Amino acid sequence: MNLEKVVFAFFSILALTLNFGFFIGELDDPAHHNAYELFAALVVSLIATIMKFGDRAHIGALLLATSLVADLHLIAAAVVWGYTLYVMQIEMTPAIMGTIVSLSGGALLANLTSVLLLAVETVTFRR
Amino acid sequence: MHNVIYLLLRRMRLPLIVVIATYSISVLGLVLIPGVDDQGNPWRMDFFHAIYFVSFLGSTIGFGEIPYPFTDAQRMWTLFIIYAAVVSWLYAIGSILTLIQDSGFRRVVAFSNFARKVRHRQEPFYLVCGYGDAGSWLVRELTERGFHCVVVEKDQQKILNLQVEDLHDDVPGLCADATDASSLIAAGLKHPKCQGVIGLTGDDHYNLTVAITSKLLAPELPVICQSDSKDAADNMASFGTDQIVDPFEIFASRFAMMFHSPSMYLVYEWMTAVHNAPLTELKTPPHGTWILCGFGRFGKAVRDYLAMEHVKTLLIEADIDLTQAPKGTIEGRGTEAHTLLEADVKEVAGVIAGTDNDSNNLSILITARDLNPQLFTVGRQNFRSNDAIFRAARIDLTMQPATITAQHILSMLLAPLLDDFLRIANEQDEAWANLLVSRVAGVVEEVAPETWDIEISPLQTPAVFGCLIRGQEIRLQHVCADPRDRDAMLPCVPLLLKRDGISTLLPDMDRVLRGGDQLLFCGRKEAKEQMDHVVHDHQAIDYTRTGIDRPSGSVWRWLTSRS
């Protein structure tokens, strides 16, 4: 067993599950989507990205790309949230919540691809 | 470059994770810990303000407690953040600095910089392996003449020398083993502009590997290598090495030439002389018995060639068994008076100090001259750094292997026909050489002649070729005439004409030229420049051909055609 692989897979899958946890629920209902969960998803996604740094294999480059896409989506979602509350200074509306959650949905797709790629790599890996 | 980025990213993994983890834990703590707002109501910090607070705290800027003054619980947590953030940043920055100073990382950076520089070369260049005495000399001379070079050298110190040397051109140098194929490829072995590979590493085995690698990876590239022994030379030749330069062989043959035809020796010396070198004067070595100290590769070559001239040599060698010196060899280093006296130093014509140790060589020559001031002294100087002391010792003839090698390679690169010329010239007699020496001496002044070659082709000599296409007859004298006054000849001597593989020595001035002819000249530098003008300029060639200076502008041409 390779500890590096365990940690790597752990963060990749955790990023996916946290992202999914934030995404699930009524799309535009603020009560269904927790800010802490978005924060956790973003942090884990960033760490997963850095884990993928410096891998020279082709699949490593693909993994890095999917992670970067997920980061971009989640950061965009967080910025929209913060902008609404503190710059525009209005209450959260269903329309804005919808935007935030659909952005995180994009990140979810990227994270899913990432985990699928990881699975493909594991399956093709032969001892 | 990719290597560098990957290495950087790989090494930065852990430090970046530590920074992100510290930040996220700090932010989370701030958001979770309850506080009070300015009215005393319970209040919790939100993510936006928490990230803002941690960001300025982590970078030690510190704008204060915002948006409301902190409770003691929040302050306690802030205390933790201060130390954690500073330590994680120190760790991350320290890792970057360590990485930058890491010798492995710097090597990778130097290598990728070098490879990029070579890859982007637009001009033709030569790949020189080895930047020792011979290599540095050759690179200097080549860059002075407008050629470009790329250097691969194993010794870091010599690469530093290359960087501080005041050369006319930017010469990229890589500190790597030239026997490693990947470093040769990075140095441009497969680059379309690479003109040739020159192996001057000072070690036969390395040179051989360079030759093999080049011939296998880039078979069409010419390879020139130095070789100090017959075995290595044969081995290189079997791999198709185009030119093999053995400095000992060259020196020994020239030295022997001094005995039987001094003028021929001068022809050789002058034609392969350095840029702007003073003309060598003729020193004729006396006939008689010679003492030869050191029976290494140099000693063996000299002895063989002198034997062909029927010059007797007395050998002095310190290690008779190792060098397999013949019977009658006197054992000793030759630096002591008694060994030299044993070899009848007072009766012989000259002494040749040919060991591989410069101080021993000097000591031999000075001791011998003390015993017999009439001696003709020949010394082998292994290192160019000893120039000053060899000059001060006033030795009649100094043999520098590095200079001989580099000079020979340079003349082959500058004028490929020169090799042909020297080979054919060697078959001529002394009277012929005498005549040539006086002709060359008539055109040059003080400094050794330049040698150059031209080919009658649309690219190299467009003006001449244009005349030939129009059916106009071009004679050699038209090319050699002064474009300012065609009755005067340029200060140069045509040495060789090569047509359809047949070489003619010293072609006549009224020889008619044809397309594809190759010509070798020697003469003053100005002559080379003027000739370059004549063969490129239609106006100039028309003038030297017909003697009529045709106007170039359309108005003047129209006016002249009317009259």
Image: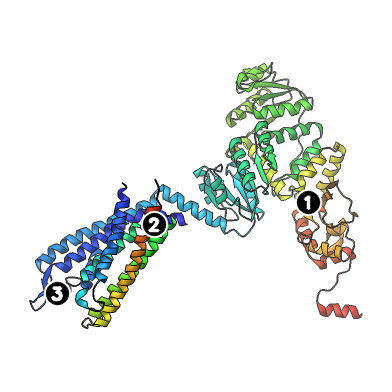
Quadrant location, the C terminus of chain B: bottom right
| Secondary structure beneath label 3 | loop
Count of labels in the image? 3
Chain containing the residue with disc 1: B
Q: Nearer the viewer, residue B60 or B18?
A: B18
**Looking at this rendering, what residue extends furthest in the front direction?**
A123
Chain containing the residue with disc 3: B
**Looking at this rendering, what residue extends furthest in the left direction?**
B40
* Residue at 82% across, 41% down: B424
Chain containing the residue with disc 2: A
- The correct choice, above or below, for B84 with respect to B229 in the image is below
* Residue at 79% across, 31% down: B259
Based on the displayed image, in which of its 4 quarters is residue B278 positioned?
Answer: top right
Q: Which residue is mark 3?
A: B68
Discs 3 and 2 share one subunit: no
Discs 1 and 2 share one subunit: no
Q: Nearer the viewer, residue B101 or B543?
A: B101
- The correct choice, above or below, for B293 with respect to B53 in the image is above
Q: Residues within 10 Å of mark 3 (few under 14, many from 20)?
A: some
Q: Which residue is mark 1?
A: B523
Q: Amino acid at mark 2?
A: Val
| Secondary structure beneath label 2 | helix
Q: Which residue is mark 2?
A: A120
Decide if residue B293 is on the left or right side of residue B541: left
